[in-house]
Amino acid sequence: MGVKINEAWHSYLEEEFNKDYFKNLQTFVKNEYTSGRCYPPGGQIFAAFDHCPIDKVKVVIIGQDPYHGPGQANGLCFSVADGVPHPPSLVNIFKEVSENTGQPIPESGNLERWADQGVFLLNATLTVRAHQAGSHQGQGWEQFTDEVIRTISKECENVVFMLWGGFAKKKEKLIDRNKHLILKSGHPSPLSANRGYWFGNKHFAKANEYLKKVDKELIKW
C-alpha cells in the first residue's frame, strides 16, 4: 500500500513502509480517521517530510504529539495553522527566538517558513484523536519516527538536533554525536519554562553558529 510522502524520503523509508508494524499502523490510522475526528488533516500527516526533504535537513526539532484541538495541528511539531492563537509552548519558543535574534515575535505560528529552510519538525507520533492527547501513541508511529531519526543521523552530515524535555532527550541514543550537534534543554511548556529549564538555552543562536561553522546557510528564525 503506497504512502503519500516526499519522494526523496520515500526511497530511504520504503523498507519501513513494507514492514508488518507499519501496515498495522496504516490500518489503525485509517480506521481512526474514518470513525471520528483526528488531527492533523489526512493530507498533512507527512507535512514535515514534504516541506523538508532529507537532503535539505539542517536542523531537527522533536515533539511528542500533534495538537489535538480544532484547526491547530498542521503536521509540523509545535506549529499551528495561520490565524490560530499560539499555544503556550510556541509562545515560549518565540520568546526565546526573539531573545536570540532581536526580531519581534511573529504574528503567525505556522512554522512552514522554518521547514522550508531545512528545519525538520518531527513529532514522534504523527496523528492524534481530537481532544485526546496521546491517543495514537503505542500504535507504531514511535517505531517509524525512531527509524527516521536514525536515517537522518546516518545519511546526513552536520545536522543540529534540538532535544527539548525528557521525552526528546531519550532520542539522543539514536544520533551519532561525532557527526552532528546535539542541543538539550528543558521543554518550552510553561511548567518547565517557568522553572528556568527553557529560557536562555540560546538554541537558535547556537544552531546558526554551528551552521555557519560548517558552511551551511543560516536559518532565518
Image: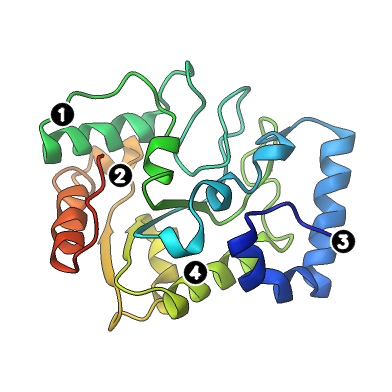
Q: Is residue 179 left or right of residue 17?
A: left
Q: Is residue 64 left or right of residue 186?
A: right
N-term-proximal mark, 1 vs 2: 1
Name the spot of residue 33 as percent of width and height, x first: 82, 38
Dot in front, 4 or 3:
3
Q: Is residue 66 left or right of residue 195?
A: right
**Up-down: is 27 above or below 102?**
below
SS of the residue under disc 2: helix
Question: Residue at position x 79%, y 75% from top?
Answer: 19
- Residue type at the position of mark 4: Ile
Residue 149 circle label: 4
Quadrant position of residue 214: bottom left
N-term-proximal mark, 1 vs 3: 3
Residue beneath label 2, please? 192
Distance from the alpha carbon under mark 1 to that under mark 4: 30 Å
Distance from the alpha carbon under mark 2 to that under mark 3: 41 Å
Distance from the alpha carbon under mark 2 to that under mark 4: 25 Å
Question: Residue at position x 41%, y 60% from top?
Answer: 57
Distance from the alpha carbon under mark 4 to that under mark 3: 23 Å
N-term-proximal mark, 1 vs 4: 1
- Residue type at the position of mark 2: Ser
Residue beneath label 3, please? 1
N-term-proximal mark, 4 vs 3: 3
Residue beneath label 1, please? 103
- Residue type at the position of mark 1: Gln
